[in-house]
Image (cartoon, grey):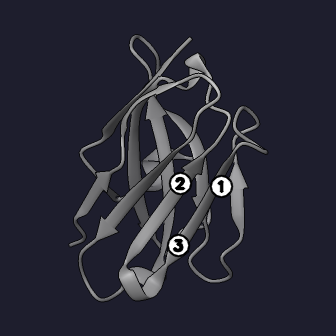
Amino acid sequence: QVQLVESGGGLVQAGGSLRLSCAASGRTFSSYTMGWFRQAPGKEREFVAAISWNDDNTHYADSVKGRFTISRDNAKNTVYLQMNSLKPEDTAVYYCAADRYGTRYQRSYEYNYWGQGTQITVSA
């Protein structure tokens, strides 16, 4: 069982930056592919970014590529999402997710564990 707790959400002006953190419980964090997803009101949950468990390869949705950076610190059981040049369309609830030995990082149904979500609001 893995528990995920996100933090770092809030309100920011367009063009600003935020860093999300997701702290995981347990002693097997390094074996999990970690992903970030988001869900805006009235829309389906969508993939944002992921970092692989075995080689730290990173993957991004086209909409955030070049603006967002995902990273992980296995010693702290934490994954981060640095978000720069934020746009109003980035407004959503952001969720952290974990998939042990995961390889299909864009598919939300592959992830077994989810955080409670944190709200990001970007004002124009």
Q: Position of residue 73 (x, y in %)?
A: 49, 79
The residue that disc 2 covers is: 81
At label 3, counting other C-alpha atoms closer than 10 Å, the crowd grade (few under 14, some 14-19, many 20 or more) is many
Q: In the image, what residue type sits under mark 2? A: Leu
Q: What element carries label 1?
A: strand
Is 90 situated above or below 19? above
Q: Where is residue 30 in the image (x, y as percent from the top left)?
A: 46, 84
Residue at x-position 61% and y-position 50%: 49
Q: Do the residues labelled 1 and 3 touch (CB within 8 Å)?
A: no
Q: Is mark 2 on a helix, strand or loop?
A: strand
Going from N to C along the chain, the mark reached first, 2 or 1, is 1
Q: In which quarter of the image is residue 124?
A: top right
Mark sitting on residue 69: 1
In this rendering, would 60 be left or right of 14? right
Q: Do the residues labelled 3 and 2 touch (CB within 8 Å)?
A: no
How many angstroms separate mark 3 from mark 2 (CA)?
A: 9 Å
Q: Is mark 3 on a helix, strand or loop?
A: strand
Q: Where is residue 87 in the image (x, y as percent from the top left)?
A: 62, 23
Q: Are marks 2 and 1 in contact (CB under 8 Å)?
A: yes
